[in-house]
Structure formats: C-alpha cells, structure tokens
Image (cartoon, helix red, strand yellow):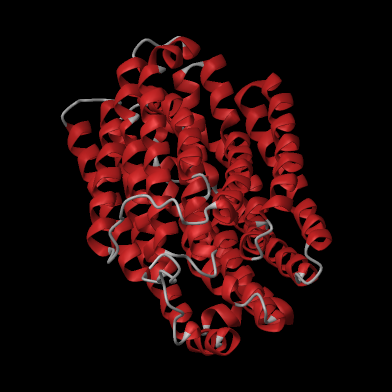
Amino acid sequence: MAGEPASAATPSLGRLAAGGALLTMGGQLVKTAVQFGGIVLLARLLTPRDYGLFAMVLAIIGVGEVVRDFGLSSAAIQARQLTAGQRDNLFWINTGIGLSLATCMFAAAGAIAGFYHEPLLVPVAQAASVTLLLNGLATQFRADLGRGMRFRSLALADVGGQAAGLGTAIAAALAGWGYWALVLQALAQAATLLALLVLASRWRPGLPRRDADMRPLLRFGGNLMASQLLTYFSNNLGQILVGSRLGPVALGHYNRAFALLMVPLTQLNAPATTVALPVLSRLQDDPARYSAFLLRGQATLMHLLMAGLAFGCALADPLIDLVLGKAWAPAAPLFRILLVGGLLQAAGYAAYWVFLSRDLTGPQLRYSIVSRVLVIACIGIGAQWGVTGVATGYSTGMAISWPLVLWWLARCCPGAPTGGMLRGGARAMAGYGLCGLAAHVASLPLAGLPAPWVLLAGATAMAATFSLLCLLWPAFRRDVAGILHTRTLLRSARSDVSP
C-alpha cells in the first residue's frame, strides 16, 4: 500500500546501534586494509603519470557522483516514514540521473581531454562514465540496507566491491596496461558492489508512482546535494588546478598524497555516519539522549582519526618512502600539509550528523556556500605558488571552517551541544598534536636510517606521550576510556538510544 511505511520501527534501537557500530566499523577496517594495500601495491606497479591521467577524469566523475546521488540516499535513511511508492520513485530518479550523467560524460570526453590537453583521456572518460550508471542503480539498494540497519550486509558488499576492484587493477597492472588498470578497477568495483547490494536487499523496486509525495525528499536531497557539490568542488579544485597547470606527473604526486589523507577520513566517517544518522534521526524528540549519543560518537571518531593523522603528519617522509616507494618522495611534503587540513576537517563531522538528522539541510547549504567559498578562495590564492601552495590553501580553508561550523550550528540549532563538541574536539587535537610533535622530534636523529626504524622510533615516542597524557590529563583519559572499554561503550549506547 502506498500509505504504509516501507520499514517498520526497530524493537531495540540501542542493541542495533551497538551491534551495527561493531559490524560497520569491522567491515570498514577490512575495506580500509584492502584499499590501503591497493595503494601500496599499485604505487609500485604504476607511475605518477598513470595516476595523474586517471585523476584528471576522476575529478570530473566525482562531480557526477554527487549529482547522481542527489542527496536521496540520506533522504531515504533520514525520513521518519518512507512509503513503498516513495522508495520506488527514489530508485527511478537516481537511476535516471545516473544514466543521464553517464551519457553526458561519454559525449563530453573530447572536451575533457581538450581542457587538460591530453588526447589519451577521451577513451578513459568514455569508459569511466559507465560507473555513473552503475552507482545510480545501486543508490537506493544501499539506502534500503542502511535504513533497515542491516550493517553486516552493507559491510560485506563494500568489502566485496573493494576487493574485486583491487584484484582487477593488480591483474591489469601486471599485464602492463598502465592507467587502464585504474579505469578497470573503478568499473569492476562499481559492478560488483551493485550485484552484492541487490543480492543482499530484500526489496525490489516497482514501477514509478504518481501518488507518492516526493516533495519533502527532493527538498532534503536538493539542499544536501548542493552543499555536497560545494564540498566536493572545494576538496578537488586543487587537483583540477594542478592537472591543468602542471600536468599529470605533478597531479599524480598530489593525488596520491590526497588519497592517503582521504583513506582514513572517508573510511571512518562514512560508516560512522551510516550508524549515527538513523539513530540520531530517531532520537530527535529526546534531547538528552541525542546529545549523549552525539558526543560519544564524536569522541570515538575523532580519537581514531586524529591518532592516525597526527602520526602521518609527524612522520610523512619515512611513511611515504615505506608505503609508496622512493619514486614518490615529492608527495611527502604535500601529504604533511594536507594532513593538517584533515585534522581540522575531521573535527567538523559531528556537526554534519546534526544537520542531517535534524533535517537542517537549508542551513547546512547556506553554511556550505560560505565555508566552501572561503576554502576555494584559499586554494585559488595558494595556487599562485604551485602544488605546495594548493595544499597549503586547502589546509588553511579547513582551519577556518571548523570554528565556523560550530558557530553556525549554535545559531540554527540552539539545542545542539556545540560547547561539548568544541571542548571534545579541542582536547583531541591538543592531545594528539603533542603526541605527533613527540614522534617528529624522536625521528629527527634517525633521518638517515631505513624508514621502518624511523617509524618505529616515532611510534614509540608517540605511545609514550599518549600514556603520559592519559595519566596526567583526566578529561583526555575519560575520553579514551570510553573508547577502549568496548563493553562499557555498548552498554552506554543501549542506554542512551533505547526508545
């Protein structure tokens, strides 16, 4: 029936949230390991030019991916009730957008090649355009699993797609196919992910329904898409500028540095949002539990992210040497600069959860316009000093955005615990900043030794500093204890989000 909810309320939200968090994060750890392993292996099989050529197309494809989703996956998950007709219509909307974008991308391949002055990009862009259609078909199957809190199925599909793509890329690279290995990786990953999501989902779309009210979903999705477009463009403007001005080799170095940054950011933020959004959406009428769950989620995400980012920033040179090889040494200073921006970007993720769960996509869009214009301006100014200036401009923009988003959230959502978010974020940044500083200082006398020894010395110094902070700083110690004691965390989650 058109008026019946497509998904019934879950009987024990806390139990599902706690179990879902473990399944999602566990699956994401496997997916991250596969992705990181792929970066290590393919960096030794392919050249910076290979990565630069594919990155030129990928920067354009990414814009299409944001439009293809149109914010409707989050709209479907966030909605308190979703009728069968609405869900069917969402599928056809996402599929139609994906097909239209794939067709436009195929037709515009020549223009893309002309913009970068690289004729080789014509067949690359045409082949990569197929991913827009495949991902358009997959959008609402993923949303259905997320709305139903079937986190295990989502994790298995993500890992399976990632593994299939990597296996295809390695085989093609070993066969000497160069940058085509990266194109085939994207195609194999999208096709496998679609197949696994369809197999896992218990839902099959019906024909479009005219009687389904789509206006709230399209309004939510349209506002979200606009803000996501601004975010994507500001994140990737640097790659477009480097590719068009300095060519594929410089872009290859920048692209790998940026990819190493985005592995922890996206691979932890995406599953955290998958778990947090449906839970917070159902806690909108319980401010105390909403705030408790939000602050707990922010602390967990920030400590996990900032530990890794601070370590990478402190030991960028030996880390790049070990992970990518000596041929990628020019990426190390870029990696260090970008990681500073990543630290500040991670601090704002919890605010994004509030915007979505409270259906504040209008205020979020206005914030995105202001903040991302500032980021774009910083990147544009920095581009005058080449690829290093682009990286510095990105991190400067992120430094401005974090306090801005908390101020914005306090104005449009007075009940949001912005004070607690600010204090928790500042503690994490200060604590891991000190840990990173200790790691960097410890590594300096060992600069001539092999990378593993330098990294070991830095990790030892960082662990010692971390232990000292836990001993001497009670608030920092409480934050860490809530993450390390898994059973306590799960019991708190059950209490905080029980209906």
Q: Quadrant of the C terminus?
A: bottom right
Q: Looking at the image, which residue is at 71% across and 83% down?
A: 288
Residue at image coords 73%, 35%: 373
Q: Quadrant of the N terminus?
A: bottom left
- Image point 73% across, 32% down: which residue? 378
Q: Nearer the viewer, residue 462 or 379?
A: 379
Measured along the vertical axis of the image, is residue 22 above or below residue 412?
below
> In the picture shown, does residue 102 fall above or below 257?
above
Between 459 and 261, the one nearer to me in the picture: 261
Is 124 on the left-hand or right-hand side of 307? left
Q: Quadrant of residue 102?
A: top left
Could you tell me if residue 36 is visible in this image?
Answer: no
Q: Residue furthest front?
A: 211
Q: Position of residue 243 (x, y in %)?
A: 51, 20
**Position above or below: 301 against 186:** below
Is residue 453 visible from the viewing direction of this image? yes
In the image, 32 versus 124, the foreground residue is: 124
